[in-house]
Amino acid sequence: MVKAVIFDMDGVLIDSVELGLRARKKLLAQYDVDLDTIPDPQGEAHRAASLKSLLQNIENHSGVHIDHDEFAKLSRELMREELQEISADPDLTVFLEDLKQHHITRAIVSSGLREGLDIKLEVLGIRQYFSVFVTGNDVTEHKPHPAPYLYALESLNLPAKECVVFEDSQTGVQAAQAADCKVIGFTKYNPPQKQLVGVEATVKAWSDISYDKLEILLANTH
């Protein structure tokens, strides 16, 4: 039986992956870095990289050192401007309310920093649905390392078998699976050609899932 549902943020709770990528490219150009020329070790065109991993990867390949805190501050300012036109998916709110009514704990595990998460939750207006928040500030190892999800399980005080994760990236899927969590791929905001490997099931829109459907879905994967 599911006791907690854990959500990734970017690309799951909010359609911000492409927006965030464009913002990063715009800022990196100020440092004379063309992100398109930097290979991504995870093979996802930098769409799932934490800021720490991204900047380290840039330095490894280009030799350009970028101050983490300075870049994070600039990123937050630009993202706040860009996100003003975004609102929460009404079907997501219905699902979160459904989980709440069934006393299912809700958590967020994001590779982003706490300040960025706060901005997105403020824009979406859904903070009240979550009791556990894990960000890049809380762990030293980031996705695909299981550390973020292990931290979440410890905070929830629940075993992995009682938690299910919604992820949109292969990096996130690998991290959740390495923590022994069951993973459902959420693909609404993904490119059509992108396939998530190893997930229990795939959900294309929040209107396709509910608490009852989630239980049935997981029961059928046993």
Image (cartoon, grey):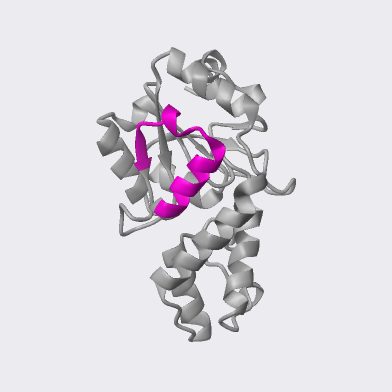
Does 211 sit above or below residue 128?
Answer: above
For residue 32, side relative to residue 105 (left or right): right
For residue 68, side relative to residue 21 (left or right): left
Q: How many marks?
A: 0
200 or 121: nearer the eye?
121
76 or 35: nearer the eye?
76
9 or 170: nearer the eye?
9
Q: Visible in this render: residue 34?
A: yes
Tell me which residue sits at (64%, 27%) in the image. 90
Tell me which residue sits at (60%, 37%) in the image. 186
Residue 176, position in %: x, y? 42, 42
Tell me which residue sits at (63%, 25%) in the image. 91
Tell me which residue sits at (42%, 66%) in the image. 52
Residue 131 on the magenta segment: yes
Q: Quadrant of residue 124?
A: top right
Q: Visible in this render: residue 179?
A: no
Q: Looking at this rendering, what residue extends furthest in the right direction?
A: 192
Main secondary structure along the magenta-highlighted residues: helix
Which residue range is magenta in the image? 115-133
Residue 56 on the magenta segment: no
Residue 1, position in %: x, y? 39, 17
Residue 192, position in %: x, y? 74, 45
